[in-house]
């Protein structure tokens, strides 16, 4: 019987991001976690901004996480599904990343979240580091 992955938690974002090789966590301007590989961010916890807000109340979301994606088509695949917790805003037009609220992260399994974070890391790591990681994990490029 196949093991089913449990629902993801915000703590998993931190665990999965730091579990990738050559990762540094730095603090953003408001103490928010920013995960980088080779000096390039691939996951960060965003401070409340005017472009991400509750459409009913106008309150800014305080729990937005930005995750890089490999391509525009990957971004569209994640944000176009109305049931997906991933979204974007006009501020991120042309930026290879998606947004997800921490309060909705449980709509993903831990395995689904791991795949998105691994893809984010791979999209920002050097070619050599990415190739080495893929080879070590028996993943075809």
Image: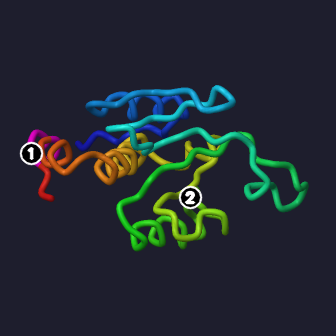
Residue at mark 2 to residue at mark 1: CA–CA distance: 29 Å
At horizontal 50% and vertical 27% (from top left) the residue drawn is 26
- Image quarter for residue 141? bottom left
Prevailing SS of the magenta stretch:
helix
Q: Quadrant of the N terminus?
A: top left
**Number of numbered discs overlaid on the protein picture:** 2
Q: Which residue is mark 2?
A: 86
Q: Is residue 58 left or right of residue 126?
A: right
Q: Estimate the x, y position of residue 50 in percent, counting from the top left.
A: 79, 54
Q: Secondary structure at mark 2?
A: strand
Any magenta on residue 136? yes
What label does residue 135 carry, if any? 1
Q: From what the image shows, is residue 22 above or below residue 139?
A: above
The answer to which of marks 2 and 1 sits earlier in the sequence is: 2
Q: Residue at x 43, y 45 (%)?
A: 42
Which residue range is magenta in the image? 133-138
State the residue in front, 71 or 111: 71
């Amino acid at each position: 019987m196949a093991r089913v992955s449990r629902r993801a938690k915000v703590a998993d974002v931190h665990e999965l991001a730091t579990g990738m090789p050559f990762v540094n966590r730095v603090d953003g301007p408001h103490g928010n976690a920013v995960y980088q590989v080779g000096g390039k961010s691939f996951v960060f916890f965003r401070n409340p901004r005017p472009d991400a807000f509750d459409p009913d109340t106008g309150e800014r979301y305080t729990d937005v996480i930005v995750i890089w994606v490999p391509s525009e088509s990957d971004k569209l695949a994640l944000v176009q599904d109305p049931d997906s917790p991933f979204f974007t805003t006009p501020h991120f037009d042309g930026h290879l990343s998606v947004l997800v609220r921490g309060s909705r992260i449980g709509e993903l399994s831990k395995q689904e979240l791991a795949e998105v974070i691994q893809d984010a890391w791979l999209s920002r790591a050097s070619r050599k580091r990415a190739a080495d990681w893929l080879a070590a994990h028996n993943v075809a490029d």
